[in-house]
Amino acid sequence: MRLVRSGASTTGGTDVRPILHFTAASGWINDPHGITFHDGVYHLFHQYVPNSTVWAPNCHWGHAVGGDLLAWEHRPVALAPGEGDDGIWTGSLVRHDDGSTRILYTSVVQPGIGIGRIRVATPEDDSWTTWAKGDVLIEAPAGLDLIAYRDPFVMRDGEGWRMFVGAADSVGLAMALTYTSADLEHWDYDGVAVSRSTGETEPVWTGALWECPQFFEIEGRWIMVSSIWDDDVLHHAGYGIGQLVEGRFEADSWGQLSFGDSYYAPSFFRDREGRPCLMFWMRGVSDPAEGWASCLSLPYVLSVHGDRLVAEPHPDVNGRRGPGGTADSTFDMLWDPAPDGDLLVLRSQEAESAVVSVRDGILRLDRPGQKSVQMPWTQGSVRVVVDGPVIEIASVDGLLGGAIEPVRQIMPTQGESRTWTLTRTVASGRAGRSGSSR
């Protein structure tokens, strides 16, 4: 959770919302968190500022439920400011082996909202609709000259529990602080799990603060994913791959997962099949005239390829594939660009909506009135998902996306492509190859 600035309207007051990307009925949203499969449904919690299309520190925890990771139904606000909180910022949902559930969240109090406190809340019903706030469990440690402290992430550690909290000091050192507990109530500070200076740029730069630090294991490799913040500017999602031993993370490699100015605040979870997944906040997708701002990304399944973390759209996206039709505003494309350079031109009703180009090892996204954004491209297939005013582009090299004008036409490319329309509900007869060009 952090201070943020809203993006520009992308739908011109017509309320052309995405159908597969979560948005608030009205108001501002940002970080997803606490995504959990429980009693046959997924629960999604998220940062929410009602009655506003810009961020404000009085964040709530919004709540939604769904049978899969794309069909969400809004539920009442789970946690709201008050009872000693001026804002309910990002945190974790934890399920104990004894069946009990807790939310551990960042409690902020004006005026010092940069330094949060870790507070607990427990559900008052089995549907997790109403929650009761408990005690403040942890205050920021003294002696570290901290300027930021927030976003607890909790996981099992042997027979006990381990928490990581994002932090930064006054000289540009990004840190994940760590705590241990036997019962989720009493926590002991265990020092700095990992740190890196904003002055370090090789192989990648990782900023002065890690917001929403998430730690998880994939096939014996430990990964830290975080949001890169520096000097009040939100950048992208980065990661380290290495080992976690006795609460200390040693990175063998550092990388950049998302590119451009949209993806931020990745939230780790495991789906109903146990697959490691992420979902992001997407900035810049908004329609203030219609009273809503920001959306959440598609869900992604994670894998590790050597020293690279790879995210690909979750199988629930494939389940929405219907018959062909490349002129639909919501579609899923598998694109194999021509190796010597290629253009994918997406047109709205009146003009170009977006141009995706690949050349000389760079994949670039250009949109009228917005700055060009790019990411590396080392050959191979590119997945392009367009959902009304949102585009997401995924390859083994990372994620790139943001706001666009709704697409009405896809121009042919030199490479090969396969395109499926996407539907709001699970397609009854999922298509295979539906549209192609060469």
Image: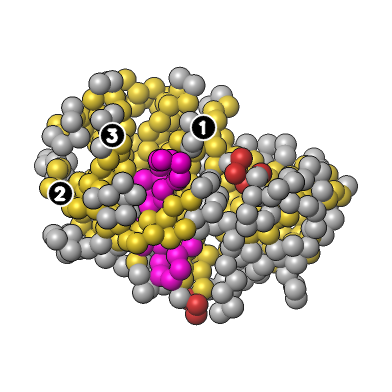
Is residue 232 toward the left or the right of residue 282 in the image? Answer: left
Coloring applied to the structure:
secondary structure
Residue under numbered circle 2: 134
213 or 338, which lies in front?
A: 213
Q: Check whether the beta carbons of the residues at disc 2 and disc 3 lie within 8 A of each other.
A: no
The residue closer to the viewer here, 88 or 234, is 88
* On-image quarter of the N terminus: bottom left
Q: Which residue is mark 1?
A: 273
> Label 1 to label 3, Cα distance in Å?
19 Å
Q: What percent of the width, then of the height, locates residue 323?
A: 78, 52
Q: Residue 30: within the magenta?
A: yes
Mark 2 or mark 1: whose residue is earlier in sequence: 2
Specify few, some or many for label 2: CA neighbours under 10 Å numbering under 14, 14-19, or 20 or more: some
Alpha carbon distance from label 2 to label 3: 18 Å
At label 1, the amino acid type is Glu
> Circle 3: is it few (<14), some (14-19), or many (20+) Cα within 10 Å?
few
Residue at the image point whose x is 62% and y is 57% from the top: 424
Q: Earlier in the sequence, mark 2 or mark 3?
A: 3
Query: Label 3, on which residue?
Result: 99
Point 49% across, 36% down: residue = 272
Q: Main secondary structure of the magenta part?
A: strand
Q: Earlier in the sequence, mark 1 or mark 3?
A: 3
Badge 1 density bin: few <14, some 14–19, many ≥20, Cα 10 Å = few
Q: Position of residue 374 (x, y in %)?
A: 61, 51
Q: Magenta residues?
A: 23-48
- The amino acid at mark 3 is Gly
In what element is the residue under mark 2?
strand
